[in-house]
Image: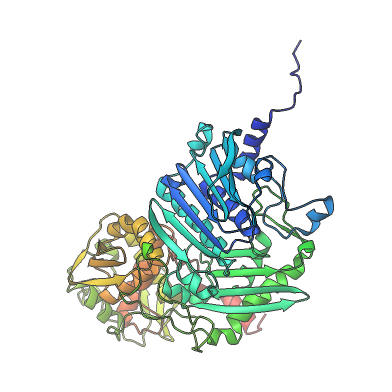
Amino acid sequence: MTHTPEIKILPPGLKNQIAAGEVVERPASVVKELVENSLDAGATRVDVTLEKGGQSLMVVQDNGAGIGADQLNLAVTRHATSKIREFGDLSAIGSFGFRGEALPSIASVSRFVMTSRASGADEAAFIDVRAGDVAGEGPAALAAGTRVEVRDLFANTPARLKFLKTEATENRRCQDTLMRTSLAHLSTGFSLTVGGREAFRLPANQDLSTRLAAFWPPNICDGLIPFDFERNGYRAHGAAGAPSTAQGRGNRILLYVNGRQVQDKLMLSAVRQAYKGMLLSREYPQIVLFLELPCGEVDVNVHPAKLEVRFVEESLVFSTIRGGVMQALTGPGMETMPPQESRGGDIPAAPSGIPAAHGSAFFSSPEKHSHQPTSLNDGPKFSTYRDFTEDRDQPKKMDLPFSPSIAMVREPMAPSMMATPDATRPATLAGSGFTYLGQIADTYLVLRQGDSLVLVDQHAAHERVLLAAMREQRTKGDSQPLAVPLEISLHPSEAEVLQDARETLRTMGFVLEMDGPAKVLVRGIPPTLDTGQAREYLTDALAEKARGLDDFWTMMACKTAIKANQPLAVDEALALLEVWLVTPEREYCPHGRPIVVSWSSSDLEKLFKRK
């Protein structure tokens, strides 16, 4: 007979550790909870210190209202809180904390010391908790506010400790958490010190543009468009990025509800709907969106981490957000964003604090912004594809990226093999069933296949061809040395991206050398790029418009492919079509757009209403 285990009430320490599994996932979770407690206490200054990714030490100190000496023990007791009093309070939560779980959960998986001095108190007091057990209490020295020290996080729960990432990754996540919180509380000053080095210091009472410029590169801040939209008591405001600055990751989509950072599919869907038709399938905008609505019409008590919310009026939330973002993308706001200051050498390194006012004029001075990306290079243009290929291939003596049978840039055939077709005469592509008829708008190649009419986008087709070649030689790493290196000034956020992407860029042919913390020297570039294209490419890469190696190749293919509005001679068009026809995945460009469209004779009859 099977023995049924006896049901027992779990001891308090085990309860707290179970709760900690939901509240405290990693050091960034601890930073979030402690900083939100500081904001609930009315702090106007919050300072955070990290050692070894937060696992060794985290300190959060503020100048808030503080906690009385007789309340410190209650503060680390589960489900004890000053934020709510009765059941009805749950329906209109205005504070960040309210569950009474964060401090006891943190204290149960670390060595936890909290020192606080309540407003008007003669002296401060402290409480020392080790793995959930109180080890000491008494008077302490502190001028004002609260100071929380968390040491040896997860030391008593090794199973959780092994899931932490590298020190650099955990530091970055803590910095990202504090950055996101700081954007919603511009009246509060914040600082972060990592390993004894100040990562940033944000004064109180900044505007959104100045605060964002401390974290996002100037070329992104330049493209941000302010918006402020209200509907039926709901307000959506913030700043949205121009479609031309879209990137390959969604890490710069920041959503807030009543000042609380959230992750919500409905809000994200409204943002994507506003950008519909302006972005490709794998592109993401930059946006900082603040939604304000009555506290009683949003439920934040969905998960202990308090990142999920539920709305009473989902349709109103959707339409308000969509209306706000559309206001930025289609309204007068598109013409009110000024250019940021030039990317000179005066951009400070990360430890020296906030960059000089990049984006400081972000809500003034009109200047029209186009949805099309602007080139940093005003180099030579080419009248034909032959000029284009000769300029890039012959002087640099590159190996062709295709086998001779499908080489796009090839030696002319002997007259006995193929006579040069007249520009007005159809030319047949041998063995393919296609006949080339000509070019429309210097952009589309017109073909006939049996009774069907076919159009090919020359830029998209060449993108696909180049990407296929790059994938075949992706680890070759050929580089063209530069006699005079390119100098590129780096925003602190760009320096971090470069550190992560440096090996990938080297594989592609970029030879990079850091010249101090805020400048990189480009000593070699891929042979397929000229210096202007290389600078533009690196600028896009540092703006995180690519997520991985294949995305980098896609970006490079786009930069080097022939463009729309570029006339091609007949033999050049035939060469492009020949190699495109044997390229894998030839129906769509690397961004997901169609390369070819066709109409059968039946389709044409329907268009002319013959059927």
Drawn side of residue 233 relative to residue 529, left or right: right
Regarding residue 170, the answer to whether it shows in the image is: yes
Rendered position, 472 above or below 325: above
The spot of residue 140 in percent (x, y) is 55, 45
Q: Residue at x 77, y 74 (%)?
A: 233
Regarding residue 450, the answer to whether it shows in the image is: no
Q: Residue at x 78, y 76 (%)?
A: 232
Drawn side of residue 59 relative to residue 537, left or right: right
Q: Residue at x 31, y 73 (%)?
A: 535
Depth check, front residue: 336 or 199: 199
Drawn side of residue 577 relative to residue 294, left or right: left
Depth check, front residue: 415 or 144: 144
Q: Residue at x 24, y 65 (%)?
A: 515
The spot of residue 273 in percent (x, y) is 64, 70
Rendered position, 197 above or below 393: above
The spot of residue 388 in percent (x, y) is 27, 79
Rendered position, 552 above or below 370: above
Depth check, front residue: 375 or 589: 375
